Each structure stands twice: as C-alpha cells, then as structure tokens.
Amino acid sequence: MSQQPPDRSTASPPARPDASMSLLTNVMDHSLDDGYAEASARRRADGTAGLPRTLKSKLGFAACLVLAALVVTLGAAEARVSAPVLAKERQELIGRIDDETAAADSLEAQVDELRGDVGRRQRKALEQHGGDQGERVALLAGATPVEGPGVKLVIDDAKDTDQGGGGPRESSGFSDTGRVRDRDLQRVVNGLWQSGAEAIAINGQRLTALSAIRAAGDAILVDNRPLVPPYTVLAVGNGKQLGTSFQDSADGQYLQALKDTFDIRTSLSAQQKLSLPVAPSLIVRTAEPYKAADTGSGAADAGKGTS
C-alpha cells in the first residue's frame, strides 16, 4: 500500500496587528535608554537605589522633611499675620486719597466762587461806566449769559475709531482718523461765527475772542479745560438761517466730508431757546470810562473803550 508523501510546504506566520506601527512598537518596547537601564541595574546591585537604607540616612531624610514642613508652616503663618496689616494700610491710603480729593474739590469750588465774584464786579464796572456800550462789550466778551434761538450741533467720534482712507485729513498723519480733533472743532466754530452766530459754547464752555482750542494728546482743550466726546456746540443766532448758512459754508462741507469719509457722527438741529453761560476766564486788561463826543476832543475819546 502506497503512502502519501509528507507535505513539506510550510505556511507563513500571520502578520502582527501592529506591523504597520513599528516605530511606536519600538518606542514602547525600549522606553528606557540602554545606558539608563544599565545604571539603574548597577545601583540596584550596589544597594544604593531607592530610599536610604541606614538609620542615619533615614533620620537625615526625615529631618529634611520636617524642615520643609516647618518652612511652609511659618510662611503661611506669616502671610496670615501680615494680611490684616496690609489691609489696614490699604484702607488708610484709600482714606487719605478720599480726603485729598475732597480738599481739592473744595478748593476748586472756592476758585469758581471767587472767579464768579470777580466776573460780577467786572460786569458791574462795565455797566456803570460804559452804559449801552458796556453791555455790548460784555456780550461780545462773554461776560454776560446769553439766551435766545440758535442751533445745536453734536459731534462725536466714529464707532470704529481705527478707520483709514482718503479724505480731508489723510495728509495730516493722523493715526486714528475716526476721532474728532482740535482742528475739526476750530473749523466748526469759525464756520459758525462766519455764518452769523452771536455766541457759542462747547460742552458748556463759553467761547470768546480770546478762547483757544488746542490738543493735549488725544484730549481736546478749550481754554485749557479738557473736553470729552460727544462735543455739543451751542450757537445763538437765527436758528434756521444760521444752520443753513453753516451747512452751505466751506466749514460745513468739511464737517460733512468727515462724516462721509470717516463715519464721524454729527447732528444739527434748530433750537427755539438756548442758554449759554458766562465765560469763566474773562480778563479785563484795560478799562477807560466812555465819554460822549460833545466837544472837539470827544471825537478822539470816542474810539476809546474796553478791551
């Protein structure tokens, strides 16, 4: 009976599931460098690995732990003790700041009161010696309050003050063209004067022939007093006619260009009654009694008045 020859063919072993991840497998199998492994084995053989073995080493290790705990405890206790002292000093500093602020406010109120008294005395002197001319000079100099019809112009910065582009201020080097600048208010005020305004105030600050509109950083100063937006400009005059004349003027068109180009917000409205305060910085430099032109020399005196 013939026998079957043995089957000498050998099947290839099945592929490992992680065959495609040989790099990760190598890292997992040899996570510790060979040099470190040898050093660790040598220390284990010498008995120097792990926690200290002798009593002296154990006591030294325990002493270090106790010292570390003591330092942490003392630091926490010192922080707890010093906390009330710091809080007390902070409260004292806040109290001193509040007291100094109140004293500064009181002094400012006294200055305003004295300035008002000086203004009243000046107006009284002008009325006594100048008559009708004194009232006219007081009105032009901002020494008397004004009431009457006029226009109300509100100017505010753009909502997005980081805008750019061409326009009437592009060549001036402004880093933020969406903000209202001092030269903008200067042009607006000059345009209102030229359009027939009789008296003007910005944010309650009365303007006179000696008023100055300047800039200090990003702040706008009117007679050295800082203003914050929105800027409310009140101009006493013929309301509708004044508003129309200003819009048709070059300065009114300049303001409209700022609105169209840089989204500066503006609104102009006619008002039936406006109240403008007295200028706080009125300074009378020279004052001479007015003399009627009843003689030959009176003609020469007629040109003298108050400045």
Image (cartoon, rainbow, N blue to C red):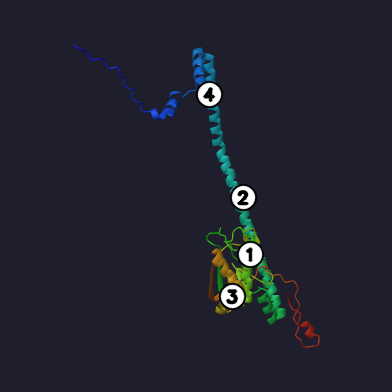
Give the residue type that dot 3 points to.
Phe
Residue position marked by numbered label 4 in the rendering: 66
Q: In percent of the image, x 55 and y 36: which residue is there?
A: 79
Measure the alpha-carbon separation of dots 3 and 1.
19 Å
In the rendered structure, which disc, 3 or 4, sits on the residue that comes first in sequence? 4
- Residue sitting nearer the eye, 289 or 157: 157
Q: Which mark is residue 182?
A: 1
Q: Nearer the viewer, mark 3 or mark 4?
A: 3
Determine whether the residue tagged by mark 1 lies in a helix, strand or loop: helix
Q: Nearer the viewer, mark 1 or mark 2?
A: 1
In the rendered structure, which disc, 1 or 2, sits on the residue that comes first in sequence? 2
Q: Residues within 10 Å of mark 2 (few under 14, many from 20)?
A: few
Q: Which mark is residue 96?
A: 2
Residue position marked by numbered label 3 in the rendering: 246
In the rendered structure, which disc, 2 or 3, sits on the residue that comes first in sequence? 2
Do callouts 2 and 3 mark residues in contact (Cβ within 8 Å)? no
The quarter in which the N terminus is drawn is: top left
